[in-house]
Image (cartoon, coloured by chain):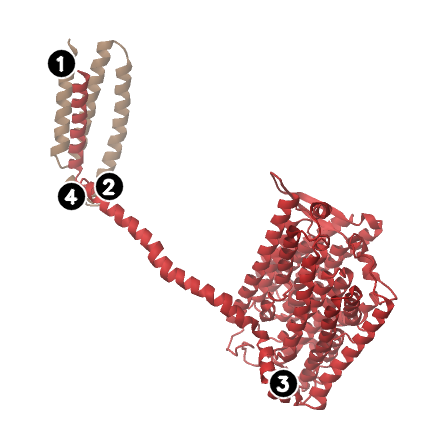
Chain colours: A red, B brown
């Protein structure tokens, strides 16, 4: 089979799985839905490997394949087919998405069992994987937008998965609304491209763009800025980041899959995919890199003070995507994609470990209430530490090589890009600190009652409650199920975590500066037309970055150790000394408050105004006014309608007689 | 015979029917009077047909009879429905369409 046939299968399997579960959900006993869902994703992963093998068989210059199933729209000037575009970049994404998704599906089989929405969960999750694969394999802007909107819906459905939780449905609506801002920008970008170039498929767009636009012409800058807004909404970059922290209302495996490993990196993929356009608009690319750097610092600073375990990891995700956006915006494409891959591994692992911790705490997510879980949960502890080491770029771990390659390429570009390098290094320190803040506060220290009970072999069972508001809940459909599952007791959770841990440790060997460039060489056919292709960091810069990265990472971990293990209480002292800074950070730089003031309240006021004033006086007034006019006008005619049959007959006879006489007279 | 006599008879029957429709209150009688009016029309048609020596008027008369038959079916159906609902057999009582 050819590479494109495999690629079609990659898309088809998750769709089939989703439909199968959705149609049969009433007849699927126990964990069958989970098994069907996982197998569908596994088949998709195998197909992705098939596509990879077939693609590597071809000579380098032929590794761009386009395949169309049928024509979607063919009308005057618009020609859209159901295209997929298979090249190293899309195959790499398909491999990451299907591979990580498969592991998270397997984890979910155990983690979600007992939930009343079990089959619905897997149907949604398979649908998400289908949409994400459609997005990465799309061959034109229309299919891209379709996939883009589908993942938005899947994200919404899974954030609001526990739909009887009010906070969850609000969070889902918020994610959807913020994402629609990005969708609209993306649609506008596609319209501009169609209007300027007359085509919508990638191949011809990238061919025609360099002839049609001068560098930094306003149209191409506008197109790229619109694409950037679309990418930023999906990838939770400032100022469209507010939804991601709230998206943690979804089940933890969903946070691992959609809101850490795959969907939120779609924006990074989009910028990398559109690199021929972004290179024509260096202004837009610079703006994007600047925002990426700002997001990086902002999100890391919020993660320093957040107390909700999942929200800390969510802000960490926002911050790490900042690295990737910064990388792909300064044409360090393979470095950005490499970090995307390693981040998918260690962040998914970190969420899985966090899910296990939350289960052990019977749904509690506040790290202030966690402590000393190390002895009760040795496996989870090891997994969390591996993920935290990779996240804090500990020397030798995957995160070390991927993050430092980005920083090296920023430094290599020189001049203003040193600022980005500086931001990246500062954040590396903060990242190491907050990663180990979690480790030390959750796993070390005096064991909590739950931890002691677990050491005795009893899993804590609290009354079901909303971890955010503390509201009481039941365990029926629409709320989390009655059972909690920790990795120590479920082989199905252990195995995927162990695989991801190995990947988090060893994936770095794919690309060690000065030794090998596996990812870069693999992606070369996609990015060889880039005008920045072939830029390599000088040896001096490589050494500087690698040594600097190791020092910042160790310093951050050391600082966390000093503050939370050696001298516990230092952090409280800091909060007491710097109350303003702490309030500023724990309110997430007041972004939510600002949106509330600038967008939500005016919109609500507008809505109330429309319903109370416009609706009542203008719309109602028009309606009742029309009715009044008609009523007055018809009062004359109405008196003729006596309701007496014989009256009507008389009128008829008189009328006919009258007419007959008239014609008689006239005909004379 | 002169066409005039036919037309006089036809007009007389038509007027009798019309008067009946206007003055009687029983729906059944009104229906009968309507038939009178229709047949007065038929008589005129046939008279003209005979005068011109063509079949056109007779064909018209046949069609009028068919329409009249259909109309009687509907009319009698209405009357039976009224009877079943124990409504008064008086068209003046049925004035709900008063505007």
Are both tags, 1 and 4, on one chain? yes
Q: CA distance from mark 2 to mark 1?
A: 41 Å
Q: Residue furthest right?
A: A515
Per the image, label 1 sits on a secondary structure element best described as helix
Q: CA distance from mark 3 to mark 4?
A: 85 Å
Location of residue A542 in the rendering, given as x and y in whole percent from the top left corner: 84, 69
Residue closest to the eye, A14 or A62 = A62
Q: CA distance from mark 2 to mark 4?
A: 15 Å
Location of residue A667 in the rendering, given as x and y in whole percent from the top left corner: 19, 17
Instruction: Inspect this view and state whether residue A163 appears.
Output: no
- Residue under label 2: B81
Q: Chain of mark 2?
A: B
Given contact means CB atoms under 8 Å apart, are the residues at marks 1 and 4 in contact? no
Residue closest to the eye, A640 or B37 = A640
Location of residue A481 in the rendering, given as x and y in whole percent from the top left corner: 57, 72
Q: Earlier in the sequence, mark 2 or mark 4?
A: 2
Are both tags, 3 and 4, on one chain? no
Question: Residue B93's mark?
Answer: 4
Location of residue A109 in the rendering, given as x and y in whole percent from the top left corner: 66, 67
Question: Residue A450's mark?
Answer: 3
Q: Chain of mark 4?
A: B
Q: Earlier in the sequence, mark 1 or mark 4?
A: 1
- Residue under label 1: B5
Q: Chain of mark 1?
A: B
A628 horizontally vs A639: left or right: right
Are both tags, 3 and 2, on one chain? no
Q: Earlier in the sequence, mark 2 or mark 1?
A: 1
Instruction: Count neighbours of disc 2 (C-alpha within 10 A) and say few if under 14, some if 14 to 19, many if 20 or more.
Output: few
């Amino acid at each position: 089979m050819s590479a494109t046939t495999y690629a079609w299968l990659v898309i088809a399997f998750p769709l089939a799985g989703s439909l199968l579960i959705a149609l049969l959900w009433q007849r699927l006993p126990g964990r069958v839905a989970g098994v069907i869902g996982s197998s569908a994703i596994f088949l998709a992963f195998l197909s992705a490997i098939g596509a990879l093998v077939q693609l590597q068989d071809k000579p380098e210059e032929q590794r761009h394949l386009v395949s169309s199933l049928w024509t979607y729209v063919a009308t005057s000037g618009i020609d859209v087919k159901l295209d997929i575009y298979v090249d190293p970049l899309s195959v790499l994404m398909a491999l990451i998405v299907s591979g990580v998704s498969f592991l998270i599906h397997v984890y979910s089989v155990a983690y979600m069992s007992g939930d009343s929405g079990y089959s619905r969960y897997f149907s949604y999750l398979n649908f998400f994987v289908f949409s994400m694969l459609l997005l990465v394999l799309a061959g034109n802007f229309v299919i891209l937008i379709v996939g883009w909107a589908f993942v938005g819906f899947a994200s919404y459905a899974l954030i609001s998965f526990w739909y009887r939780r009010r906070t969850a449905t609000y969070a889902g609506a918020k994610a959807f609304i913020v994402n629609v801002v990005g969708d609209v920008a993306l649609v506008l970008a596609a319209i501009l491209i169609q209007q300027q170039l007359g085509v919508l498929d990638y191949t011809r767009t990238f061919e025609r763009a360099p002839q049609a636009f001068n560098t930094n012409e306003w149209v191409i800058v506008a197109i790229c800025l619109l694409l950037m807004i679309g990418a930023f909404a999906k990838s939770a970059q400032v100022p469209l980041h507010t939804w991601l922290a709230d998206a943690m209302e979804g089940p933890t495996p969903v946070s691992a899959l959609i809101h850490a490993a795959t969907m939120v990196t779609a924006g990074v993929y989009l910028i990398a995919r559109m690199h021929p356009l972004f290179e024509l608009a260096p202004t837009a690319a610079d703006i994007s890199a600047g925002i990426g750097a700002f997001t990086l610092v902002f999100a890391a600073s919020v993660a320093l003070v957040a107390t909700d375990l999942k929200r800390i990891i969510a802000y960490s995700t926002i911050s790490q995507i900042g690295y990737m956006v910064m990388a792909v915006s300064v044409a360090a494409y393979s470095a950005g994609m490499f970090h995307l891959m390693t981040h998918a591994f260690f962040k998914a692992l970190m969420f899985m470990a966090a899910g296990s911790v939350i289960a052990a705490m019977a749904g509690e997510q506040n790290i202030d209430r966690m402590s000393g879980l190390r002895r009760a949960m040795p496996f989870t502890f090891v997994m969390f530490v591996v993920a935290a080491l990779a996240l804090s770029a500990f020397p030798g771990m995957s995160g070390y090589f991927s993050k430092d390659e980005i920083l090296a390429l920023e430094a290599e570009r020189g001049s203003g890009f040193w600022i980005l390098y500086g931001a990246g290094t500062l954040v590396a320190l903060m990242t190491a600190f907050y990663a180990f803040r979690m480790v030390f506060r959750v796993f070390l220290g005096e064991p909590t009652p739950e931890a002691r009970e677990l050491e005795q072999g009893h899993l804590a069972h609290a009354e079901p409650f909303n971890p955010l508001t503390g509201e009481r809940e039941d365990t029926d459909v629409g709320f989390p199920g009655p059972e909690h599952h920790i990795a120590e007791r479920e082989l199905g959770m252990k195995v995927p975590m162990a695989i991801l841990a190995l990947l988090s440790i060893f994936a770095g060997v794919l690309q060690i500066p000065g030794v090998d460039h596996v990812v870069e060489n693999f992606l070369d056919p996609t990015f060889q037309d880039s005008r920045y292709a072939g830029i390599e960091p000088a040896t001096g810069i490589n050494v500087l970055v690698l040594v600097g990265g190791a020092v910042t990472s160790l310093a951050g971990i050391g600082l966390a150790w000093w503050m939370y293990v050696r001298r516990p209480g230092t952090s409280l002292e800091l909060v007491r000394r710097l109350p303003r800074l702490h309030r500023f950070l724990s309110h997430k730089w007041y972004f939510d408050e600002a949106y509330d003031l600038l967008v939500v309240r005016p919109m609500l006021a507008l809505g109330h105004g429309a319903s109370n004033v416009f609706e009542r006086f203008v719309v109602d007034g028009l309606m009742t006014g029309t009715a009044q006019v008609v009523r007055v006008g018809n009062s004359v005619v109405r008196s003729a309608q006596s309701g007496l049959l014989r009256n009507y007959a008389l009128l008829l006879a008189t009328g006919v007689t009258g007419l007959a006489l008239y014609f008689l007279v006239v005909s004379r | 015979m002169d066409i005039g006599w036919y037309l006089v008879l036809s007009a007389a029957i038509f007027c009798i029917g019309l008067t009946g429709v206007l003055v009687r209150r029983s729906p059944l009688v009104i229906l009968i009077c309507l038939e009178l009016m229709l047949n007065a029309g038929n008589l005129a048609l046939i008279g003209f047909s005979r005068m011109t020596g063509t079949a056109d008027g007779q064909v018209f008369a046949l069609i009028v009879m068919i329409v009249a038959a259909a109309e009687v079916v509907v009319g009698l159906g209405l009357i039976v429905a009224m009877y079943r609902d124990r409504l008064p057999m008086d068209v003046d009582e049925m004035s709900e369409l008063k505007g």
